[in-house]
Image (spheres, rainbow, N blue to C red):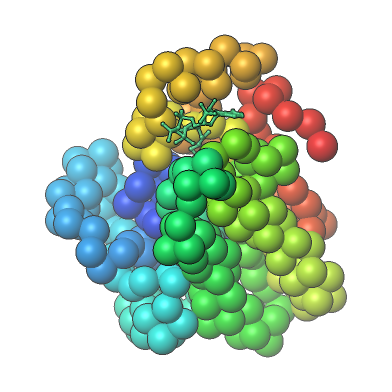
Amino acid sequence: MTQRVALVTGAMGGLGTAICQELAKAGHKVVAAYHPEFDKPDEWKKQMADAGFNDFVCVAGDVSSFDSCAAMVAEAEAKAGPVDILVNNAGITRDKMFGRMELAQWDAVISTNLTSLFNMTKQVSGKMAERGWGRIVNISSVNGLKGQAGQTNYSAAKAGVIGFTKALAAELAAKGVTVNAITPGYVATAMVMAIKPEVLQSIIDSVPMKRLAKPEEIGGACAYLASDLAGFMTGATMNINGGLYYQ
Ligand code: CAA
């Protein structure tokens, strides 16, 4: 296989870590992008090295800021080379029933989970098209498809990710660049574990497979979408949710 450079945002979270590992296992050079305020990058790097992933390139940047993304991608390219594969994975929750949601909670989720796709993809998509090869994988959510009480902000952003994916896929289809979305269900990560235990249990009970997804079950799909073999797939929304929801 051809070794490509893959940049993953939110790389040091539960899902991001699994995505980095699966892309590395597929033979790619991985750039792990993390928020500048993340307090344990060195600990994460050590954990990865202990697990046999020794050559991740790490870069810090705030995906909600265009200028920060520009600087971060420039640093990534200087260290690893042109980005061939972009995984827009960084995301946050600020769950509140709508009646109690404040504008700051709305804005934080929209800028980190949706505007980030503009900020990051702008840095790489034109150059991918010029080179005639590229993969953009956007991590949406089952809750962008079905809507989730307590998540008007998150559901709106994740639905927006799907619209962005389809529109950009149409623009880049003839240029060798694919753009796809993954809609994970509830994955065993810190984000999901932060849900109140009784609420989380009722969510698990509602999943036909009666369990959370393993992070690598999402990471593996990401590696597939990034591969040459997935070259004819674009504008797709890949549901991985244990049967929780079908479009
Ligand atoms: N549907 C309709 N109404 C609901 C509801 C539901 N599913 N859940 C709660 N409510 C109602 C309650 O009955 C209550 O009504 P009253 O005020 O009239 O009594 C009101 O909403 C407030 O409920 P709570 O007292 O439970 O409010 P809270 O502030 O303690 O909790 C919440 C609200 C934080 C949104 C909590 O319900 C919650 O965590 N829900 C789960 C949200 C969720 O699934 N988040 C996913 C996070 S992981 C992720 O996002 C990853 C991914 O992609 C899947």
Side of 213 where 231 appears, left or right: right
Q: Quadrant of residue 70?
A: bottom left
Side of 168 where 52 appears, left or right: left
Q: Is residue 145 visible?
A: yes
Q: Residue at 72% x, 43% y: name it.
A: 145
Location of residue 104 in the rendering, given as x and y in whole percent from the top left corner: 43, 63
- Outermost front residue: 99
Return the residue nearer the eye: 50 or 18: 18
Q: Is residue 228 visible?
A: no
Q: Residue at 68% x, 41% y: name it.
A: 147
Q: Residue at 65% x, 85% y: name it.
A: 126
Location of residue 52 in the rendering, given as x and y in whole percent from the top left corner: 27, 43
Side of 174 where 102 appears, left or right: left
Return the residue nearer the eye: 108 or 98: 98
Q: Residue at 78% x, 52% y: name it.
A: 236
Location of residue 59 in the rendering, given as x and y in whole percent from the top left corner: 30, 70
Side of 175 where 47 appears, left or right: left
Q: Quadrant of the C terminus?
A: top right
- Is residue 189 placed above or below 69 in the rendered structure? above
Return the residue nearer the eye: 10 or 94: 94
